[in-house]
Structure formats: C-alpha cells, structure tokens
Image (cartoon, rainbow, N blue to C red):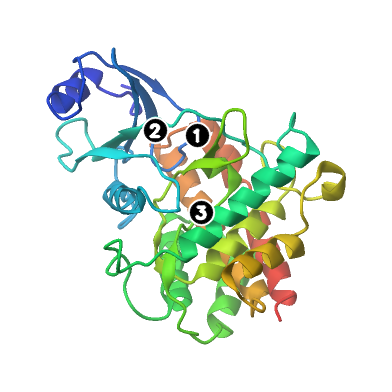
C-alpha cells in the first residue's frame, strides 16, 4: 500500500458536521510540496480546503507537530501576519493513520524560486518587499495578546535549537559528513550571548512557503509553520538570506550567481536594511552566525527527509533523495558564513 494515500472515506466521515456546508463528498489531490508533512487539496461540493497530516511510520521525537501548526495559525488569524483560516484539528491517529488538520484553501499563486520567472522587475521587487513586511510584522506580534506566550520554552534560543537539531541530525545520520561535524562544533563553541530578544519565529521563512495574490504582489498566507516557536527574530531573517545563497534553479531555489539588479531583486544587505528600518533597528549583530545556524538547521532537516526516503516514509521520495545530496553543501555554506561573522 502507498503510505502517502489519503483515506478520503475516513476523512469525510470525520469532517461530517464539523465544517459548514460540508456535503460528505471529498476529492483529494496531493500537493507536490510538503516534504515534511504531506499536504492535500480537499475539494467538496461546496468549497476547497487543505488537509495537512503527519507522515505515517516511525518519526523522530518532536518532529511533524501539526498540532503546533494549527495552534499558531489559529492564533495569528486576523493579525497583520496573513495565514489561512484553521477549521479542524484531529489528534486521533486511528482516523487516517496520523494526526492532521484542515484549513481554508487560499486561492493565489506560489513562487517556487525567488527569481519569479515571468514577473516584471517592479513586481519582483514588490513581492520581496511584501515578504519583508510580513516578516517584520511576524516579529512584532504581541505573543501575550495572541495567547502564544507559552509557545516556546524560555532560555537561550540558539543554544536550545543547536542542541535539538544536533540530536535530530545524529538520529537520522546516514553517512559521516566531516563539514557538518565541524560546523556543529564551531556553532557550539562560539555562540552569541542571549540578548533577550524573544519573538514568534516561523523557522522556515522563504518565498516558496508563501501564497501571494493571483494578479498582485501582496502576501495572502504564510504556510508551513512546523518549525515555529518563540525564539530569536534574526534566525528568520537569516533564513531568507541563507536560501538566497543557495544555487539558482529548481534544486537549490536560491540566487547564487544571479544578477539581482537586472531582475529588480534586492541584495542581501538591502533586504536586511529594509527589515531593520521596519523594526526600528540600527543593525543586526552576529548575523553571520545566524546564517550559519540556518544552514546547519536546514542541513539537519533535509538529512531527516533523506532518512525517511531511505526508510520508505518520504512524502516525495524522488525529491527527498535529491535534497539529501545537498546536506554537505549546507554544511560547507555554514562554515563560510561563520568566516564572515562580525
């Protein structure tokens, strides 16, 4: 049996009387993305929804937390951070084999790569500027007012995250990667002091995790909140820059070697400066360390994706194997970022 098949009969039975206008018939189409948590378009006679589930099979502890995704998006609905409306959370794995939630389907467009082929230069720049606006708004969310003050543990965010992802990486390790070992050692040895900044963070903030207007440049929804927590805002900012430093094209989805000015795209420094202006900051200290941390964390994440592919539990096995080849690249880039840390 295909472990990614969705039992639409079970889904329909569960959703009966839980969704307004639900007529009992469901057609499910799996999205190509959603490497971590398989994601499906649910079409009913009345409207469309999206179902996001934990993958089946044995999972790493604390990974694939769809309950946290549901909670944070529900809390952010109707704030300045655009998210889909949440409807139903199912924490009974007996229904379809794993926990899942159902949210609105946001009708818009998604850009897999930051080059946004086909857009004008003005529109490319406007999309990235709105991406910057939403990121600043996320970090300005009053976590007490939206009920998320307990969404992450107290203490040193970087120390906590590096410790967590080192354990996750070791648990899914399939080969020895010397650069990754060195990066882990250096991150642990020269960690910035905790400066007390504590905000909501997305954890995987990048353009392909966002939905924009179908014929405009405004963000309609930020997706994929699995890694969200209470942490340090510079990690999200560094996540954007990390992505841009990867190779261009469908595999890396970055901007390495791209003439950004010719496409109307900002430089790394310009994006950071716009973010600082929005949040009233003079500068971002130790930014190279935060970029290195993001390279390490993403390397650990895709190592987990590779391990699930080897174990037969990947959402998209072919894509997972392709991603797995990038773990050494992430490690090497993390080491380069540390050399530029100031």
For marks 1 and 2, the one nearer the N-term is 1
What secondary structure is found at the residue carrying circle 2?
strand
Task: State the image coordinates of residue 288 (x, y, percent, origin top left).
Answer: 67, 73
Q: Which residue is mark 1?
A: 33
Q: Which residue is mark 2?
A: 39
For marks 2 and 3, the one nearer the N-term is 2
What is the spatial separation of the Cα atoms under label 1 and label 2, in whole angstroms? 7 Å
What is the spatial separation of the Cα atoms under label 2 and label 3, in whole angstroms? 17 Å
What secondary structure is found at the residue carrying circle 3?
loop
Q: Are marks 1 and 2 in contact (CB under 8 Å)?
A: yes
Task: Return the residue nearer the eye: 125 or 332.
Answer: 125
For marks 1 and 3, the one nearer the N-term is 1
Residue 109 occupies which quadrant of the picture?
top right
At x 52%, y 87%, the residue is: 193
Task: State the image coordinates of residue 16 (x, y, percent, origin top left).
Answer: 14, 23
**Residue 327 makes an appearance in the image:** no
The numbered disc on residue 204 is 3
């Amino acid at each position: 049996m295909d472990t990614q098949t969705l039992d639409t009969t079970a889904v329909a039975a569960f959703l009966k009387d839980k969704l307004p206008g639900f007529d009992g018939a469901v057609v499910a189409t799996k999205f190509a993305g959603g490497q971590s948590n398989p994601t499906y378009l649910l079409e009913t006679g009345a409207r469309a929804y999206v179902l996001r589930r934990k993958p089946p099979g044995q999972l790493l502890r604390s990974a694939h937390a769809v309950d946290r995704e549901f909670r944070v998006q529900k809390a952010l609905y109707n704030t300045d951070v655009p998210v889909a409306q949440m409807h139903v959370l199912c924490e009974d794995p007996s229904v379809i084999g794993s926990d899942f939630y159902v949210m609105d389907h946001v009708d818009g467009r998604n850009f897999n790569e930051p080059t946004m082929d086909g857009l004008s230069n003005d529109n490319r720049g406007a999309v990235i500027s709105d991406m910057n606006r939403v990121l600043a708004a996320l970090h300005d969310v009053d976590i007490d007012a939206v009920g998320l003050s307990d969404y992450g543990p107290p203490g040193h965010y970087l120390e906590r995250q590096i410790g967590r992802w080192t354990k996750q990486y070791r648990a899914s390790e399939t080969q020895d990667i010397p650069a990754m070992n060195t990066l882990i050692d250096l991150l642990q040895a020269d960690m910035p002091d905790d400066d007390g900044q504590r905000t909501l963070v997305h954890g995987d903030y990048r353009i392909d995790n966002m939905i924009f207007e179908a014929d405009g440049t405004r963000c309609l929804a930020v997706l994929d909140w699995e890694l969200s927590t209470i942490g340090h805002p510079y990690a999200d900012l560094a996540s954007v820059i990390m992505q841009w430093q990867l190779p261009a094209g469908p595999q890396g989805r970055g901007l390495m070697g791209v003439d950004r000015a010719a496409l109307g795209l900002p430089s790394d420094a310009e994006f950071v400066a716009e973010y600082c202006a929005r949040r009233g900051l003079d500068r971002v200290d130790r930014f190279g360390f935060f970029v290195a941390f993001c390279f390490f964390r993403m390397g650990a994440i895709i190592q987990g994706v590779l391990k699930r592919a080897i174990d037969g539990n990947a959402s998209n096995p072919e894509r997972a194997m392709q991603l797995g080849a990038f773990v050494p690249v992430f490690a090497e880039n993390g080491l380069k970022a540390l050399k530029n840390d100031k």
